[in-house]
């Protein structure tokens, strides 16, 4: 996609939603970290239902340790892979208490040292909690990047690095939110809503839908 088209692409998304927000509920950087960790292979709606009560009793890593793994599982058992996620969340809480004074670190390398935290989770936390211009590539963003030709890549990392190179600085802060929400609600996997897409004329996708239902 040409530079002028990239600028116009993000200008339109910005016009529609100047201050996009993630859809996971949280109260501080730590609860955001927990919510994002729980969201792997799960829906934001499902995670929010589980954390609604959890975050009434947990707001810090020490709170999580005091709660314990078994009681944590009771809160998150409706979420896929909850056993593994609960184990990692407890391990990560211990690391945060022991190594970071109970504070969530503000750099990717430190975050990725935590149990159960990969690059995508780290990028989400850095972007939402600390305002850093990171791009978290989930399945929606990966699809949008390839389908629109904004950033063609065979891996999430390849798409992330390409997007970082082409997105103008004035849009980079909110870029991953715009793209994720665009993929979630308009540029859907099975049937994209092309007739209502605000960037349809900029997109070279060959199998565009003609009638939106």
Image (cartoon, rainbow, N blue to C red):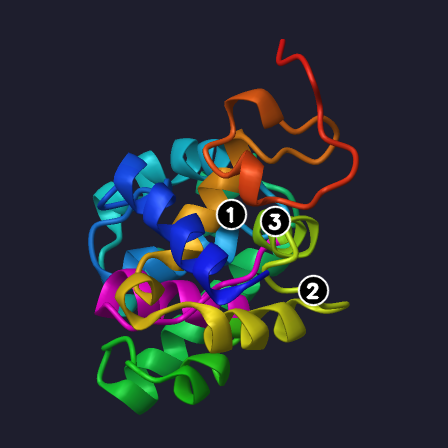
Visible residue check, residue 74: no
- Residue at 64%, 33% in the rendered image: 188
Q: Position of residue 103 (x, y in %)?
A: 23, 77
Visible residue check, residue 207: yes
- CA distance for labels 1 and 2: 39 Å
Marks 3 & 1, CB-CB < 8 Å contact: no
Q: Would residue 155 appear left or right of 9 to someone viewing this image?
A: right
Q: Position of residue 70 (x, y in %)?
A: 50, 52
Marks 1 & 2, CB-CB < 8 Å contact: no
The region drawn magenta spans 120-138
**Quick one: SS at disc 1?**
helix
Crowd around label 2: few <14 · some 14–19 · many ≥20 (10 Å): some
The mark that comes first in sequence, 1 or 2, is 1
Q: Position of residue 77 (x, y in %)?
A: 56, 39
**Quick one: SS at disc 2?**
loop
**Quick one: SS at disc 3?**
helix
- Residue at 56%, 77% in the rendered image: 161
Crowd around label 3: few <14 · some 14–19 · many ≥20 (10 Å): many
In this view, 136 is above or below 73? below
Q: Which residue is mark 3?
A: 144
Quadrant in the picture for the N terminus: bottom right
Q: Which residue is mark 2?
A: 152
**The magenta stretch spans residue 126:** yes
**The magenta stretch spans residue 124:** yes
The mark that comes first in sequence, 3 or 1, is 1
Which of label 1 and label 2 is nearer to you?
2
Crowd around label 1: few <14 · some 14–19 · many ≥20 (10 Å): some
Q: Which residue is mark 1?
A: 73
- CA distance for labels 3 and 1: 34 Å
- CA distance for labels 2 and 3: 9 Å
């Amino acid at each position: 996609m040409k530079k002028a088209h990239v600028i116009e692409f993000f200008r339109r998304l910005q016009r529609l939603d100047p201050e996009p927000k993630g859809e996971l509920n949280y109260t501080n950087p730590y609860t955001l970290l927990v919510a994002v960790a729980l969201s792997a292979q799960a829906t934001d709606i499902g995670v929010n239902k589980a954390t609604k009560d959890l975050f009434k009793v947990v707001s810090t890593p020490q709170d999580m340790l005091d709660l314990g793994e078994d009681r944590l599982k009771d809160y998150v058992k409706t979420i896929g892979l909850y056993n593994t996620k609960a184990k990692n969340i407890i391990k990560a809480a211990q690391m945060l208490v022991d190594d970071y004074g109970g504070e969530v670190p503000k750099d990717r390398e430190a975050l990725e040292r935590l149990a159960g935290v990969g690059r995508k989770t780290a990028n989400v936390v850095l972007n939402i909690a600390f305002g850093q211009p990171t791009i978290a590539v989930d399945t929606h963003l990966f699809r949008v990047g390839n389908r629109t030709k904004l950033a063609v890549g065979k891996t999430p990392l390849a798409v992330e690095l390409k997007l970082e190179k082409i997105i103008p600085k004035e849009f980079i802060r909110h870029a991953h939110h715009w793209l994720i929400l665009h993929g979630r609600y308009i540029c859907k996997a099975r049937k994209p809503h092309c007739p209502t897409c605000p960037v349809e004329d900029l997109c070279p996708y060959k199998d565009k839908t003609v009638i939106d239902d």
